[in-house]
Amino acid sequence: MQRRKATVTATVAGLVLTGSLAAVAAPAYADGSSPSPSAGTAPHAHPKGPKTDGARALCRRVPKLDRRIAREIKRLDSGVGTPGSIAFLRQRVENAKKENHAAIAKFLGDRLSARQALLVNLKQRQSDLKDVATWCKANGKGKPANSTTSA
């Protein structure tokens, strides 16, 4: 009995909510005008775009990003005994080929190709991040040039 009562209560609440949303949305489209520019955008969206390039925030995150990228590169470059490494996946592809599982070998081979491309991408990001760290050190950790206050 309680389960049925809870179901009925939830259904009625859902219908009331749907009706209230329809009542609120109906007047916005009733006049035929187009919605305002802020309609449908997230509350945190910037209608005129970003105000800065985010250098200060990026400079703060450089050490964390560097550790994360280094950890991922280390995992990918590890040996056969490390799940997630390229060698581990390569061994799985070879095992699938030995057992004549062509579909499995193809699937794993595609994953291997993607993982190898990821390694190249991560090494490039690591190099770029070192350049960012050098820039941050030389430019006061990304503080705006026209700033007179200290944070």
Image (tube, helix red, strand yellow):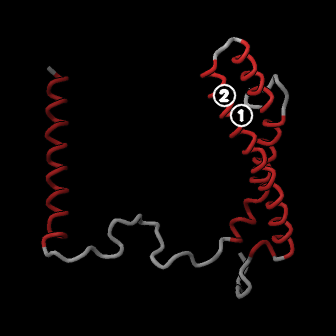
On residue 108, the disc is 2
Left or right for 31, reference 64? left
**Vertical placement of residue 70 versus 82, above or below:** below
Circles 1 and 2: CB atoms closer than 8 Å = yes
Q: How far apart are marks 1 and 2 (CA)?
A: 6 Å
Question: Dot 2: few (<14), some (14–19), or many (≥20) neighbours within 10 Å?
Answer: some
Left or right for 3, reference 123? left
Q: In which quarter of the image is the C terminus?
A: bottom right
Q: Where is residue 39 in the image (x, y as percent from the top left)?
A: 32, 69
Q: Which of 100 and 52 is in front in this view?
A: 100
Q: Nearer the viewer, residue 120 or 103?
A: 103
- Toward the top, the furthest residue is 99
Question: Residue at image x 64%, y 16%?
Answer: 101
Q: Where is residue 26 in the image (x, y as percent from the top left)?
A: 15, 64
Left or right for 8, reference 102? left
On residue 112, the disc is 1
Question: Residue at image x 82%, y 77%?
Answer: 139
Question: Residue at image x 14%, y 20%?
Answer: 1
Q: Nearer the viewer, residue 111 or 37?
A: 111
On residue 121, the disc is none
Identity, as a three-letter code, of the amino acid under mark 1: Leu
Q: Where is residue 92 in the image (x, y as percent from the top left)?
A: 73, 21
Question: Residue at image x 14%, y 48%?
Answer: 16
Identity, as a three-letter code, of the amino acid under mark 2: Leu
Element class at badge 2: helix
**Vertical placement of residue 53 versus 98, above or below:** below
